[in-house]
Structure formats: structure tokens, C-alpha cells
Amino acid sequence: MDIESLKPIIKGQIVQYLNLLDINPQDIKDDEPLFGGDLGLDSIDSLELVVLLEREYGIKITNPAEGRKILVDVNHMAEYILANTKTA
């Protein structure tokens, strides 16, 4: 899988895992900040995104500083997933 085909999947997973009923996955921009932007995500949402990465991709994030670098936007998440999994 390449990065461009992974991004829409990640967007759908974000909407699903965070139960963002009023947001369409395709409306999330690849470079839109996940936190502090229009999505309005908070620290609880960041924990859910960490769970998403573990359940869907087998990626465990135990260091909060590492999580902040990965959960910047969809681009960062996709790059990290591709770099750290064999099945993505």
C-alpha cells in the first residue's frame, strides 16, 4: 500500500475511533492539525488514536513525546505507519 491510498483509510479510522459523527473523513485535510485545529481533538482523543495505531497496525506508542511527533496530522500518521509496519 502506498501513502496516498493509506490516507483515506486513516481518515475513516479517525472518524470511526473518535466517533466524530459530524465530520466526513474526506473533509479532513492531509495536513490539517489533529490537535488545536478545526477538528477540536483533545488529550482523550490522543489516547484513542494511540489505541487505533495499536489495534489496526500493531504499533505501540509508549513514549508521549513520540506520540506528539506522530499524531500531528494525517500525513505524519501515514508516514509513520508505512515506516513501521510490513502490512500497511
Image: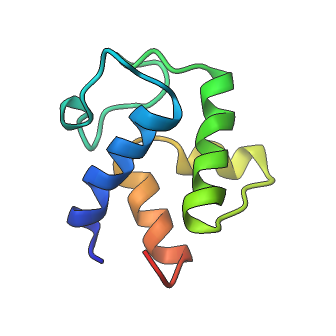
| Position above or below: 72 against 77 | above
| Residue 13 spot, x, y in % from top left | 42, 45
Residue plotted at (53% across, 77% down):
85
Horizontal side, residue 41 vs residue 9: left or right? right
| Position above or below: 11 against 19 | below
The total of numbered circles placed on residues is: 0
Horizontal side, residue 23 vs residue 43: left or right? left
Q: Nearer the viewer, residue 17 or 45?
A: 17
Q: If the image is split into quadrants, where does the N terminus sit?
A: bottom left
Displayed quadrant of residue 39: top left
| Position above or below: 65 against 85 | above
Q: If the image is split into quadrants, where does the C terminus sit?
A: bottom left
| Position above or below: 71 against 43 | below
| Residue 74 spot, x, y in % from top left | 37, 46
Residue plotted at (48% across, 25% down):
19
Residue plotted at (39% across, 60% down):
78
